[in-house]
Image (tube, rainbow, N blue to C red):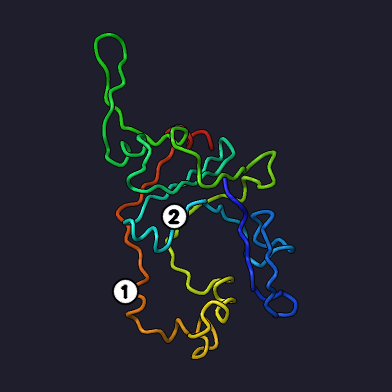
Amino acid sequence: TGTWDTAVGIPDRATGIPDMTIREANDCFVYNPKQWLNQGCVAVSGSNETLGKPMNDKGGGIYALEWDPVFSKIRTWVFDHDRLPKNLVKVLNQEKMTVVEGDDGGKVVDVVPNPDEWPLPYGYYSVGEHTNCPAKHFQNMRLVINLAFCGSVAGNRFQLDCPAIAEQYDSCNEYIQNANESVFQEEMYWKIQSVHVYERAWEPAWHQ
């Protein structure tokens, strides 16, 4: 569903000199000796409107992740507000549906997410038995909403990507520490309408 993450211009671990070789990740292990430190992997969409300014200009979108240790997979999606699958629209609108039992009535149940009704995922990762990614790597998971300004890629490419600013500051971290607060208030923030977490009713018992 996508290509592996690439990195260019990251300092070599041994020499510290930026290497302009294009290195495509061959797995998701952040300590892979043949990749940049913390390169990992990422699914790359054919659309240029799944993040950043193009996504913001459309009023944002909906990001969904399915972590399914029972069926050995992790899947991710990015949806525009006007292109949501019908099942997800019903879930977010808290619509009700009637499940008929017998000839004389039925009961009302909540609509639940069913990713199998959604379109092709943005990313698909096999985890668990018979894969190169043991399920034990995914335990006690947490949701983290974060703005990372100077990571292992952006921080190391500071002089390459921001030459004008680099004339005033020696590093990305120094720039962030001295930047005017208005830069962050006006351009760097999250606007989140809601966060939803779902779990199969039977899964907690299945894990015991």
- Which residue extends farthest left? 104
The amino acid marked with disc number 2 is: Thr
Q: Is residue 143 above or below residue 186?
A: above
Q: Residue at x 37, y 70 (%)?
A: 188
- Helix, strand or loop under label 1: helix
The amino acid marked with disc number 1 is: Glu
Q: Is residue 93 above or below residue 46?
A: above
Check disc 2 and report the residue beneath it: 50
Residue 23 percent location from the top left of the image: 68, 63
Check disc 1 and report the residue beneath it: 186
Q: Residue at x 31, y 42 (%)?
A: 92
Q: Residue at x 31, y 15 (%)?
A: 101
**In the image: residue 6, left or right of residue 98:** right
Q: Residue at x 44, y 49 (%)?
A: 78
| Count of all numbered marks drawn on residues in the image | 2
Quadrant hosting residue 11: bottom right
